[in-house]
Image (spheres, helix red, strand yellow):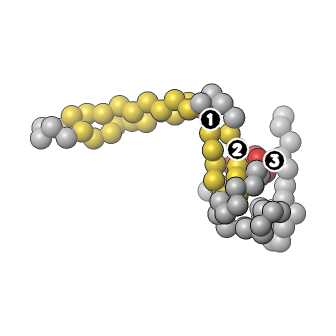
Amino acid sequence: MKKVKIPTAEPAGRITCQACGNNTDFVEVAENVLVTTHYVQNADGSFTPRENETEIHGQVRLLCGKCGADLTPFHSHFLEMIF
């Protein structure tokens, strides 16, 4: 089982970038991603997506959205807090 690193900012569990103090904007970056989209062609010739599949084969990192600092140690906590 992977340990989840919990941030210590206030309120408890809030991620804060130690480099710049940002606590609102974050970026998740996935490497080696395969995205497959299935489309249906409409009567007018346009296309509408019906289904998307995403496979991540590489590393997933969490970065500060302001300064780009690597916050990957908090990625597991980030995923648990997405509602």
Q: Is residue 37 left or right of residue 45?
A: right
- Residue 46, given in percent of the width and then of the height, sits at 19, 40
Image point (27%, 41%), residue name: 48
Answer with mark 1 or mark 2, whichever residue precedes in sequence: 1
Quote the CA–CA distance across marks 2 and 3: 9 Å
Residue at the disc numbered 3: 73
Residue furthest to the front:
67
Q: Residues within 10 Å of mark 2 (few under 14, many from 20)?
A: some
Image point (25%, 33%), residue name: 40
Image point (30%, 33%), residue name: 39
- Residue 71, given in percent of the width and then of the height, sits at 77, 52
Q: Residues within 10 Å of mark 3 (few under 14, many from 20)?
A: some
Res 8 quadrant in image: bottom right
Q: Is residue 34 above or below residue 13?
A: above
Q: Amino acid at mark 1?
A: Glu
Task: Check contact, mark 1 vs mark 2: CB within 8 A.
Answer: yes
Q: Is residue 55 visible?
A: yes
Task: Check contact, mark 3 vs mark 1: CB within 8 A.
Answer: no
Q: Is residue 65 above or below residue 51?
A: below
Residue at the disc numbered 2: 61
Q: Amino acid at mark 2?
A: Arg
